[in-house]
């Protein structure tokens, strides 16, 4: 599978809240860094458990990915999501979350991800649209 198809399948799994579909995109021993300051989730079982926790409580997801940029085995892609999630930050004045960021992915020759790194900035209490020209 090519990198664009991988990103489309990743987005579909997120929208469907499907941990079963997301783990199909990773190698069995993949490292999934959901934060630059936290230890990664390793392997299908840990990735699936993280995804289940992360996707169980959101609603009204609007998810976009920019145009991926690849160099060798690495691909970089911007993401922009807005959603409602009462569990993410219970202290927020409402459930709105804006979640822009970037994924740094390392792939095998077969097109599976062996390392996923997420960098993001969350804004609680607001739904902010992506700026003009975003993701190009």
Image: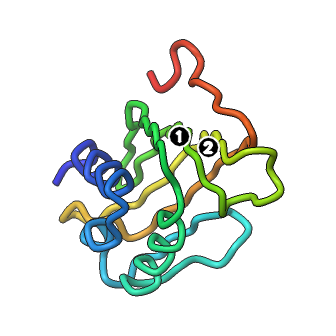
For mark 1, what is the residue? 81
Instruction: Give the camera-side residue of 46 and 123.
Output: 123
Q: Nearer the viewer, residue 84 or 117?
A: 84
Q: Residue at x 66, y 63 (%)?
A: 87
Evaluate if marks 1 and 2 touch, with contact meaning CB atoms under 8 Å apart: yes
Is 75 situated above or below 66? below
> In which quadrant is the C terminus drawn?
top left
The spot of residue 52 in percent (x, y) is: 45, 73
| Image colouring | rainbow
Q: Nearer the viewer, residue 38 or 22?
A: 22
Image point 40% across, 84% down: which residue? 43
Kindly identify the residue that appears in the image at 74 percent across and 58 percent down: 89
Image coords of residue 51 (percent x, y): 46, 70
Which image quadrant is residue 126 in? top right
Where 11 sits versus 106, above or below?
above
Query: Taking 21 as reference, is 80 above or below it?
Result: above
Judged left or right of residue 123, residue 83 is left
**Real-space Cα distance between discs 1 and 2?**
5 Å
Residue 117: mark: none
Quadrant of image for the N terminus: bottom left
């Amino acid at each position: 599978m090519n990198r664009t198809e991988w990103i489309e399948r990743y987005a579909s799994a997120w929208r469907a809240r499907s941990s079963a579909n997301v783990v199909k995109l990773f190698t069995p021993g993949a490292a999934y860094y959901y934060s630059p300051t936290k230890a990664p989730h390793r392997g299908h079982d840990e990735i699936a458990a993280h995804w289940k926790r992360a996707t169980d409580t959101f609603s009204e997801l609007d998810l976009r990915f920019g145009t991926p940029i690849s160099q060798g085995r690495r691909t970089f892609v911007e993401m922009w999501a807005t959603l409602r999630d009462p569990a993410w930050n219970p202290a927020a004045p409402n459930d709105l979350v804006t979640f822009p960021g970037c994924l740094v992915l390392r792939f095998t020759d077969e097109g599976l991800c062996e390392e996923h790194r997420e960098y993001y900035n969350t804004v609680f209490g607001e739904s902010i649209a992506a700026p003009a020209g975003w993701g190009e």
